[in-house]
Amino acid sequence: MQARTNIKITTIALFIATFMTAVEGTIVSTAMPTIVGDLHGVSLMNWVFSIFLLTNAITTPIYGKLADQLGRKKIFLAGVVVFIIGSLFSGLSNSMETLIFWRALQGIGAGVIMPVSFTIVADMYPFEKRAQVIGILGSAWGIASIIGPLLGGFIVDSLSWHWIFFINVPIGLLTIVLLACFFYEQPHKKTQPLDVAGIIWLGIFLLALMVGFQQLSSQPINYLVLGSFLCVTILSGLAFYLQERHASDPIIPIDLFHNRTFVIQNCIAALISGFIFGYEVYLSDWTQGIMGLKATFAGFAVTPTSILWMVGSFWSGKLLLKWRPQLVTGLSLIFIGFGAVSLALLPITTPLVIFWVLSTIMGIGFGLCITTSSVTSQNEVSNERIGVASSFNTLSRTLGQTLMISVFGIVLNQGMANGIKQHPQASLKLMDQLINPRTATTLPASVLPTLRQILYGALHNVFLVALLLVIAAVIVNFFDRKQIN
């Protein structure tokens, strides 16, 4: 395949596709106030984000299996086409309900990007170069976090919010043209029937699990609904397990979980991805709410992470040639652990330069850890299962982040509620104004120190919980003593 494939252009196409889906979230976040004002659906706002994550997570393992069965190219192109259609009609939406429907289709298409991109990389590159390329693709998410808000603001101000979706159409078509013309692979023949029952049970399990966790962040919590989703999660999970045990070609082979290194690396990927979410989202609340920085400048607090992530990825590729995954991951957790402990102990007066230092240190750790888990997951399975392994690694990371959205939200809200009880002059409305840099300047100077102290206490609790994730990852990594083949 490599003799006919233009590897450089194919890699560029994969980067474009990755960036296209990565920047989608930050652009939509920037434009959401305008969208809500136009479509009048503030009560449904969260579903614009949630439905995208839900359908993305559900389809990820399905794409991985189909890529192994039918071929990487046709499945990847089909997913991009679905993403383009979802983007086009999202831009044409005239109500929040319609937008949510097409965002769901967008998520279905986006589910193909990461797992099949990593699978194609595994096909094109030898083991020693794979980590470097995966690191380059992963850097698209960091770049998107910087460019997204700027691009989203420009599009909304200069054109209209509809164009934040329309812009995906030419980018997606460019990706299709590049892959169609420059990526070749041997024809794949489907030898086993598709595990439709497994797909259905897995979809129900993931849907119930993720929606159930989202119920935790609702106020007040409806325990009857939460319990119902918990029961559906358990029952569908059991049904999925029984189905996969007897399926002739399961969507996720159960014997993958007999491989200790594979399981541990994916558990660590989920834990650290959850930590990364808390770090990137809530550090922004710190820099804006406590330090009073503007949104654009506040985003640069995590810029070193994006740059040093690539350095960690390149380093991972070299180390995996000499060390087993447990040692490389252990080294990464030293970097991440240092940053996690520091975040949990930083005083309210911490200057921005300290965050840049921590961002640099943790960026190396993230690059080492996430890339090691991706490459090791692929290397622990046979070639015909690389798609499944890549998609499961992506699913682990997605679940880690999605589930921690609710947990961190509960911790932050509870922390602020406790602080408000102790200070009668404070309120949740004032806290919302504090976190938003556009409205923070309108707050009375007399109440600002109190509000910032309340926010600091709540964020301190968030970073303590985030630290627990890193500690759990260290403990889990301790049990991986299997030498890589």
Image: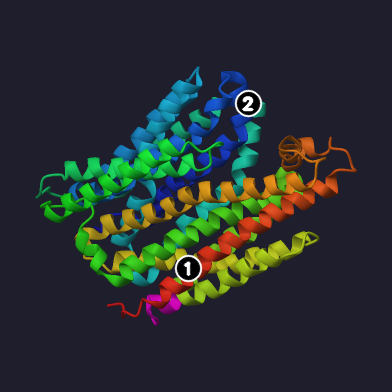
Segment colored magenta: 319-328
Q: Residues within 10 Å of mark 1 (few under 14, many from 20)?
A: some
Q: Provide residue 376's location: percent of width, then percent of height.
A: 35, 68
- 133 lies above or below 58: below
In this view, the residue in front, 374 or 476, is 476
Distance from the alpha carbon under mark 1 to that under mark 2: 40 Å
With 195 as the anchor, is 337 left or right in this view? Answer: right
| Residue occupying the far top of the picture | 94
In this view, the residue in front, 168 or 366, is 366
| Quarter of the rendering containing residue 258 | bottom left
With 460 as the anchor, is 437 left or right in this view? Answer: right
Pointer 1 residue:
472
Give amino acid for label 2.
Thr
Task: Answer whether residue 124 is magenta in the image.
Answer: no
Q: Nearer the viewer, mark 1 or mark 2?
A: 1
For the question of whether residue 180 can be seen, the reply is: no
- 36 lies above or below 480: above
Q: Provide residue 245's location: percent of width, then percent of height.
A: 15, 56
Q: Residue at x 24, y 50 (%)?
A: 238
Give amino acid for label 1.
Ala
Q: Residues within 10 Å of mark 2 (few under 14, many from 20)?
A: some
Pointer 2 residue:
34
Quadrant into which the C terminus falls: bottom left
For the question of whether residue 353 can be seen, the reply is: yes
In terms of sequence position, does the residue under pointer 1 or pointer 2 come before the other?
2
In this view, the residue in front, 461 or 99, is 461
